[in-house]
Image: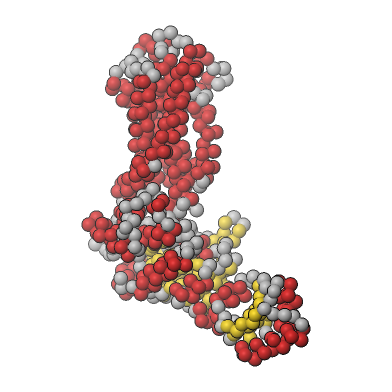
Amino acid sequence: MSATTHNKGNTTGNDIGAGSAMAGTPSANPRVLNRPRVVADAITITQRNLITIARVPQLLVFATIQPIIFVLMFRYVFGGAYGIPGVPYVDFLMPGIFAQTVAFGAIGTGIGLSEDLSKGLIDRFRSLPMAPSAVLVGRTTADVVRNIFVQTLMVAVGVLVGFRIHNGIPNFLVAMLLLLGFGFALSWLFGLIGLALKNAETTQAASFPIMAPLVFASAAFVDVRTMPGWLQPWARNQPLSAIITAVRRLILNEQQAQLLGLTESTASLVLKAIAWIVGLTLVFGTLAIRKYRRVV
Amino acid sequence: MTSTSPEAAISAVGLKKSFGDVVAVTDVSLSVPTGTVLGLLGPNGAGKTTIVRMLTTLLSPDGGELRVAGIDVTADPMAVRSVIGLAGQYAAVDENLTGRENLRMVAKLTHLPKASIAPRVDELLERFKLTDAADRPVRTYSGGMRRRLDLGAALVHEPPVLFLDEPTTGLDPASRNDLWSVIEDLVAGGTTVLLTTQYLEEADRLADRIIVIDKGGIIAEGTAAELKSSLGQTIVEVDFDGTELAERAKPVLATVGEASVLTTTVSLQVKDGSAALFATVRALDAAGIPARNVVVREPSLDDVFLRLTGDVAS
């Protein structure tokens, strides 16, 4: 580590300015590439977040306890009051539970980022010559992997309490992909909230008021047709309901869909769900990355 | 001194930053020659951390020109990030990762060539005495171990310029000494360091030059010796039983030298130590104020600091 060597390297980098990233030109620090690598950096951060998930299994356990309680409660406590002949309540319920699980799971993205911020890790990342998007992409990607695990567990729990697929495995897998995509999209929303609030408790507290109208005023647990007229347009068209309806249509058979009044074609329902996923990801992804660059 | 010289590894001219109505940094200029250590000294909230955050690309300044290793910080932050290391007030390491995983992650993110990552990580673990704990999650580490790992993470890509924001705050004396030796080794190897601290002892030991910051501006600068000698030659310290006696003694002793009170102690800045000692004893005797202890000593940086930041009743 000789001071003069550094100085020479630095002066070169300075003279050419941004050109220091050009091929064959020594970078400001000859030891490292001073250009971010979007994909490689995102993979590094994803690995880091996956290690955390594996090493703190409590997080995963608590992420699954709540939806399991919901399954048991709705299946056995409220399920008796529900009656659409020909559609078992558990088959109606599970798409709502799946969507609710990925939605609540997305809060974890915000909490994780706010913790990284308050512990100074984001400062460390922002002082490195890495891609600014990697911290967020790495977090949301790791959360997709977590969701694959949680979702598999929830399907198993569903099967244990009587849930069955009525429309073939391929359609069921498309439904699972929609759910993962929706979880990914919401991760960006809650990531943005976590970056804005910078504190795990506040992020948690702020997330519930956003979540409640999405989860409860939705098609998740009851037939929207039983709701008061003023609530129906929201409950029918909000993004969580769009996902649930598409998932339900992919899991139930033609006859059951008719009984639920799902007259729209499967393709159209799936496209609407995809439109929500892409739209939410673009809007909140852009906002979150912008927030990350400026976060103090 | 404040102009941008080609030899300066770090330079700032007319640096400014406000948060809303609160002025955090006002017109700060500084220059750190390559291979030297600058100590930024100041109380909490003086603006030290804000200055470091601007120099390390974490915060954009409202005005002023910043250069690190000759690179314009606002124009090319990515290039700056490849030549700096930052170790923070709180150890910015991932608690759930092991020490080795933390260093490997930073090595990948600084894009070290793949083949050199493992040996570099081993070398750092060895150097910071973390080899035995390398494969344990960081949450099992002591405060000192975390700080060493944090500093290790800042050094992964061998940055020629290092920013240390209160590197030893909250550490026990032994760990502090360890960290100081490591920093001294780095400087001996040619690294330029900008260090913020609240500890005068730390600045005294590590810094070639010291800048004292208060309320966002520079209030003094020089070497430790220069700052001390600016105070006068010698200090006479008189200790009393209680603050009341100290307050009563202050006007009496003001005839001997410039007097200031800190709890039960009156400090006098004097030219001639032994003459002042006799004068002090005579004055107290005449006023009938009993003293517990009288000491003559050389001024410390604490004296400079207290006087400059106005924490002294005058």
Q: Residue at x 63, y 86 (%)?
A: B270
Looking at the image, the residue that sits furthest to the left is: B115
From where the camera sits, is residue B13 visible?
no
Q: Residue at x 41, y 12 (%)?
A: A87
Q: Depth check: B238 or A63 in front?
A: B238
Query: Where in the figure is residue B169, as x and y percent of width and height?
Result: 49, 63
Q: Quadrant of residue A141?
A: top left
Q: Depth check: A181 or B233 in front?
A: B233
Query: Where in the figure is residue A55, as x and y percent of width and height?
Result: 36, 43
B95 to the left or right of B303: left
From where the camera sits, is residue B84 visible?
yes
Q: Residue at x 55, y 68 (%)?
A: B42
Q: Residue at x 26, y 57 (%)?
A: B117
State whether residue B126 is above or below residue A253. Answer: below
Quadrant where the N terminus of chain A sits is: bottom left
State whether residue A61 is above or below residue A118. Answer: above
State whether residue B105 is above or below residue A109. Answer: below
Query: Where in the figure is residue A6, as x and y percent of width and height?
Result: 32, 70
Q: Quadrant of residue B161?
A: bottom left
Looking at the image, the residue that sits furthest to the right is: B287
Render colour scheme:
secondary structure
State whether residue A230 is above or below residue B211. Answer: above
| Tally of marks | 0
Q: Depth check: B72 or A183 in front?
A: A183
Looking at the image, the residue that sits furthest to the top is: A85
